[in-house]
Image (cartoon, rainbow, N blue to C red):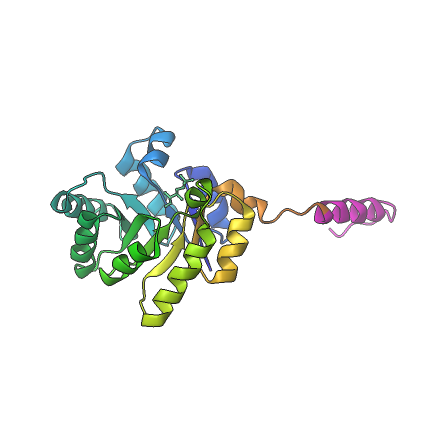
């Protein structure tokens, strides 16, 4: 399973990239607004840090403008993936940009039928938002399972990019049901390494080692 970092925080992206935990990056207009940075500039800097796809989202809502924005964003770097909303206009833009071999990430997916449409339009990635479904008491992981089955039934190559990850259990559940990619805030990725017994065990080893008076280096 690939790990994308859902952030425009260059420091956090670099930290995770350095340990092989940033196979790509996703952003959205809210993340860019939070960064306080110039959109194209911050995206260019992210693209220079990671080798994998960096999702940059269009702002237009009409297909022709989305296509123009997508082409413009793609000029920033070779690893730009154009993010498009799951609307009929977004699907039309997806079809056109995909036919030009521009990678696409169709976002704001909340149903298996929407994911089916994105795959038929040639999306590189589909982004089901599991946290936002959980927020309204619908099962986000069940949606990932349904999309997995549909894509496998028909051999669609669109990758399932589980988004709106809120906690470590979301990541485990996504791995269990076969999501191709998760995109997660950096703090949730770091929490995957934590366990109280690991901390407790390490403290015990260090205490006992100190009694030996030895050193390795
Ligand atoms: C990723 O592509 C999405 O923009 C992101 O995961 C949304 O997460 P949120 O629901 O926590 O805003």
Q: Image quarter for residue 9? A: top left
Q: Main secondary structure of the magenta part?
A: helix
Residue drawn where x is 43% and y is 46% of the image: 5
* Residue 11 place in picture, x, y as percent: 46, 38
In front here: 71 or 128?
Answer: 128
- Furthest toward the front, the residue is 137
- Furthest toward the right, the residue is 211
* Residue 171 place in picture, x, y as percent: 51, 52
Asked whether, in this view, residue 60 is left or right of residue 31, the answer is left
* Residue 182 place in picture, x, y as percent: 44, 53
Q: Is residue 132 visible?
A: yes
Q: Is 72 contained in the magenta span?
A: no
Q: Is residue 181 visible?
A: no
**Quarter of the rendered image showing ligand 1:** top left
Point out the stretch of residues depicted in magenta.
197-217
In front here: 15 or 196?
Answer: 196
- Furthest toward the top, the residue is 36
* Residue 202 place in picture, x, y as percent: 75, 48
Residue drawn where x is 31% and y is 41% of the image: 43
- Furthest toward the left, the residue is 64
């Amino acid at each position: 399973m690939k790990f994308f970092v859902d952030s425009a925080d260059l420091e956090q992206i670099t930290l995770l990239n350095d340990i092989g935990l940033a196979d790509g990056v996703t952003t959205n207009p809210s993340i860019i607004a939070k960064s306080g940075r110039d959109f194209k500039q911050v995206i260019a800097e992210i693209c220079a840090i990671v080798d994998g796809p960096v999702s940059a989202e269009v702002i237009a809502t009409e297909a022709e403008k989305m296509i123009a924005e997508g082409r413009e964003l793609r000029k920033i770097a070779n690893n730009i993936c154009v993010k498009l909303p799951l609307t009929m206009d977004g699907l039309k833009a997806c079809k056109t940009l995909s036919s030009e071999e521009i990678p696409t990430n169709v976002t704001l997916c909340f149903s298996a039928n929407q994911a089916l449409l994105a795959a038929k339009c040639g999306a590189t990635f589909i982004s089901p938002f599991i946290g936002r479904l959980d927020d309204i008491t619908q099962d986000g992981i069940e949606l990932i399972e349904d999309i997995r089955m549909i894509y496998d039934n028909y051999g669609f190559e669109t990758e399932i990019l589980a988004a709106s990850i809120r906690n470590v259990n979301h990541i485990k559940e996504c791995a269990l049901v076969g999501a191709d990619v998760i995109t997660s805030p950096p703090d949730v990725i770091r929490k995957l390494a934590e366990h109280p017994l690991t901390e407790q065990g390490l403290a015990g080893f260090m205490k006992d080692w100190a009694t030996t008076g030895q050193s390795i280096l």
